[in-house]
Amino acid sequence: MEILMTRLRILLLPAVSMLVFGTGCGGNAPVDENRLVISMIAKSTTNPVFLSSRTGADAAARELSAEHGIEIVIDWRTPPTEDGQVQAQRIAQAVNEGADVVLISCSDAAKVTGAINDAVERGVPVMTFDSDAPESRRFAFFGVDDIKTGGLIMGELAKAMDGKGRVAILAGNQNAPNLRKRVEGVLQKAAEYPEISIVGTFYHIETPQDAAAEVVRVNNAYPDIEGWAMVGGWALFTQSLLTDLDPDRMKIISVDALPPQLTYIEQGIVPVLWGQPTYLWGYESVRLIVEKIHLKRDVPVINPLELVHVSQENLGEWAGMLQGWGFTDVPERYLKDEDPPASSDE
């Protein structure tokens, strides 16, 4: 935990510096060993977690450019909304336009695996982050262990519910492999509690409005639900549920801990959020790419990202991290607590 938090604090400085990135590259330009173009394709530009990953990637590009005496360009090609087919098209476009590497968070592994393999066949290595395409020829993945994440969510929820009650799972995009694995982790952990029953897994379009509407719909359909295991934080990105959820009757544990979600912790509606240092999606991925492609070093295939346990006790420290990573909507009232967050490894 100390190593993680020290590293995160160090990374705050470049997060607010002048960043290096570009758009588009020459189609048939010769290989330039002094220039590395990384085409970055996240899931959507409307999801703030991916904007923070871009901030991290740009900061790493700036630092590593100076360190190694090369120009590292982050070529941002993320679609406005989630669409695996569009991602596949953008992989092909990046290769055609001269990208040296592709970095992608896969909305639908089945739809992008072919494009990833084609890119590798044409000499363009591919790395994944956040959401993997494990059957593809990508050289590395950086992100959380999704089954473990689901288990952490369910474990905290079981604790909050005293080990009994009816639980619903909010699961986002049914085609996203990382979310399916998180659901699997929730179900595995729930099986350890004989007095907890799962009423169902509920998928939805990954917007705050659609997610919140699904929570309300399911609560109306199953009025005896006592807990929600949210494998993504979409429903808590809107404040609409603050008045619709009764913390005395219903417990909620979610992944992600972004600025709009912090109010739910402050008001006691959500006791714990498992925060992803999403800035590191970009920062660490670019570092690994430079290790592999520029320095010709071996890197691990699977590179785990630690989750951070966020609660009322460490809300201020986490809020400060978010502000440093470029989130502009962190309420000032949270930026006071000096206690460091605890990692999932404790």
Image (tube, helix red, strand yellow):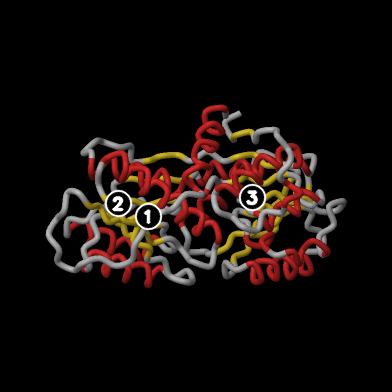
Q: Nearer the viewer, mark 3 or mark 2?
A: 2
Q: Residues within 10 Å of mark 2 (few under 14, many from 20)?
A: many
What secondary structure is marked by label 1? loop
Q: Residues within 10 Å of mark 1 (few under 14, many from 20)?
A: some
- The x and y percentages for residue 333 are 76, 49
Kind of residue at disc 2 = Ile
Mark 3 → mark 1, Cα distance in angstroms? 27 Å
Mark 3 → mark 2, Cα distance in angstroms? 30 Å
Residue annotated with mark 1: 20
* Residue at image point 57% right, 70% down: 205
Mark 3 and mark 1 lie on one chain; the one further toward the N terminus is: 1
Residue 187 visible somewhere in the drawing: no
Q: Quadrant of residue 293?
A: top left
- The x and y percentages for residue 81 are 49, 71
21 or 255, nearer to the observer: 21
Kind of residue at disc 1 = Val
* Residue at image point 21% right, 39% down: 296
Residue annotated with mark 2: 72
